[in-house]
Image (tube, rainbow, N blue to C red):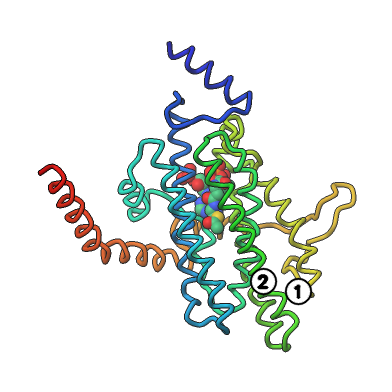
Amino acid sequence: QIKNLEAEFEAKISRDEKIEPKDWMPEKYRQTHIRQISQHAHSEIVGMLPEGNWITRAPSLRRKVALLAKVQDEAGHGLYLYSACETLGISRDELYEQLHTGKAKYSSIFNYPTLTWADMGAIGWLVDGAAIINQVPLCNTSYGPYARAMVRVCKEESFHQRQGFEIMMKLAQGTPEQKEMAQDALNRWWWPSLMMLGPTDDASVHTEQSMKWKLKRKTNDELRQQFIDQTVPQADLIGLTIPDFDLKWNEERGHYDFGPINWDEFWQVVKGHGPCNKERLAARKGAWERGEWVRDAAMAYAEKQADRKEK
Ligand code: ACO
């Protein structure tokens, strides 16, 4: 019986058909999806913090409106992703618990501080730019609810990327101080953005299996190369310099060669020792604790309504 189910599952994957919540799936497929989708959801939610920090300090009403909309979109992405994850048989409370206890990861990139307004530009341009490159292939991932959530998420990410690039472009065309601020933000966000796409393929424990299941459609190194190739000309266009002396177009490969990435820094951040890990987790835990009375009141109200209906 199990053999037949497994064969049917494999056949669906090879025909590029979606796996849906009620379909049979191997336990490892379910667990891997819970891991990746929940990490993705947590990243969206924690990702609101570095930018939320700048909403009250945006330099104009127009910038404030755009930033507010973007941060709100991220909340929405987190919520679609939590919902997609719940279809795999895990509750929202368990997912939050995993985040708050440090059992589940969230993206390394959100453990860096946002020091100046230019960081809003750099995050939109680089972080959301890398996120799009990572997420467009996920629109074709094999698990139906994840793939469908990604379609809308990618549309919104593309607005985020453009608003960030436009902030950088304006700063780069501004006074020498403004241009310097943009360059400084690029210097600080470039390497963490490359790390965000995950360890190199030979150090990536999940890639091989996730590619077989068509959870991942491209490897970490493929995505990173695509991100670099796409972003270098954009930096050239606005007159900013990528902080990598080894960066060079390789005619033979048809790609940019780039310098060594500090993987030690990456793993330190992943293990909780980045500049803002403690602050980010404390902010999420604090929000959860402060929201307890709202959850309790909502439950009490729902129970009262249900009681009234019964009577
Ligand atoms: N930050 C934190 N942890 C990471 C990161 C990162 N940038 N990259 C990899 N890791 C972790 C993995 O979670 C894994 O640890 P685990 O086994 O405890 O889960 C370990 O490092 C080894 O990495 P991989 O084997 O390469 O893991 P995976 O196959 O899951 O690939 C990737 C990592 C590319 C991030 C993948 O999970 C993915 O595509 N996720 C969906 C996109 C996403 O989460 N984006 C978040 C940021 S985008 C945004 O919020 C705007």
Number of numbered discs on residues: 2
Q: For the residue labelled by badge 1, is the local secondary structure a helix, a strand or a loop?
A: loop
Quadrant in the picture for the N terminus: top left
Front-most of residues 20 and 253: 20
Above or below, 205 relative to 102: above
On the image, the x and y values in percent for residue 23 come to 45, 25
Residue 186 circle label:
2
Q: Are marks 2 and 1 in contact (CB under 8 Å)?
A: yes
Question: What residue is at 51 percent from the left and 55 percent from the top?
Answer: 107
Disc 2 from disc 1: Cα separation: 8 Å
Front-most of residues 32 and 195: 32
Report whether the residue tagged 1 is closer than 8 Å to ligand 1.
no
Residue 240 circle label:
1
On the image, the x and y values in percent for residue 94 come to 32, 46
Above or below, 159 relative to 175: above
Answer with left or right where residue 289 lies relative to residue 181: left
On the image, the x and y values in percent for residue 164 come to 64, 69
Label 1 sits on what residue type? Answer: Leu
